[in-house]
Each structure stands twice: as C-alpha cells, then as structure tokens.
Image (cartoon, rainbow, N blue to C red):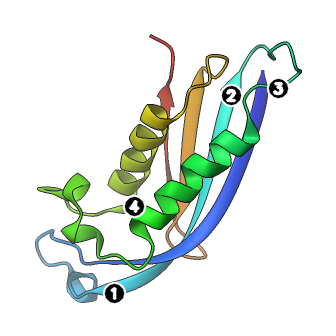
Amino acid sequence: MYTVAVSTDFVAQHFLTVPDPGPEGEVHSHHYELEVRCRGPELNEYGYLLDIDELTAAVDAVEERYRDELLNDREAFEGLNPSVEHFARIVADRLAADLDSPGVETLTVRLHEDEIAWASYERSLTT
C-alpha cells in the first residue's frame, strides 16, 4: 500500500457548545496542524499514487477556508459542537469531494488541536 501525505498549519477560533464547557465555551484560538494522507495499492503509469500538487492545492483551499475564521460561524458546523473530531470529518469530506485521484482508496485527515491533542477521520474514496 502506498501513502502520500501533505501538511499545513493555521489558526482558527471556536467555542464549544456542550453543557458546562468551562473556559472552552468562550471564543478561543487553536493553532491547528493539518495532515492529509492518501493511500492506495497501485501507482499510475507515471509512478504516482496521485498528483501531489493537486493534493497540496486542495489542502491549501481548506486552509484558506478556515484560517482566522470562527468555526461556529461556518455553514459546515451548523448544528454541531465544533469539536476537533467533527472538524477532521468535515475536512476529509471536503477533500474527498475536491480530489480526482482514482488510485486513492482511503483518505485520512489528522488534525492537531494543540501540542498534545489530535483527532483523525478516515474515509473510503472507493464506491
């Protein structure tokens, strides 16, 4: 199985909407580190799993969408507690819609919320 990954980082804000969130219920920032991994069993005729420039552009678009934004105000988080788990899934779903890479079977998003905490979401890209 081949794996290709790219990463970036950005700052975004949120506040938690769960009962008794403590200080996390106030607007605060996180320095998110985003890593995206694509996996598949075969390389294309050029020896690539996917075009890294295409993956980088898709990841850059995600970064631009959320950099310096209040996640709670974004449509994708409507009705959701903006947890790092939800954020990882939202990013994975967005990337899956933007990538055109038939050799990729799975896409994994790992999103570090701070230096010690992260969540990931893995999804299939095959039907």
Where residue 115 appears, as percent x and y from the top left, is: 61, 76
Q: Quadrant of the C terminus?
A: top left
Mark with earlier residue (1, 2): 1
How far is mark 2 from mark 4, CA to CA?
Answer: 22 Å
Contact (CB < 8 A) between labels 4 and 1?
A: no
Secondary structure beneath dot 4 equals helix
Q: Nearer the viewer, mark 1 or mark 3?
A: 3
The correct choice, above or below, for 60 with respect to 121 in the image is below
Where residue 56 appears, as percent x and y from the top left, is: 66, 50
How far is mark 4 from mark 1, CA to CA?
Answer: 13 Å
Contact (CB < 8 A) between labels 1 and 2?
A: no
How far is mark 1 from mark 3, CA to CA?
Answer: 40 Å
- Tell me which amino acid carries mark 2: Arg
**Horizontal relation, residue 113 to residue 81: left or right:** right
Mark with earlier residue (2, 3): 2
Give the total number of marks visible in the rendering: 4
Pointer 4 residue = 84
Pointer 3 residue = 48
How far is mark 3 from mark 4, CA to CA?
Answer: 31 Å
- Tell me which amino acid carries mark 1: His
Measuring 45% from the left and 73% from the top, which residue is drawn there? 67
Secondary structure beneath dot 2 equals strand
Q: Quadrant of the N terminus?
A: top right
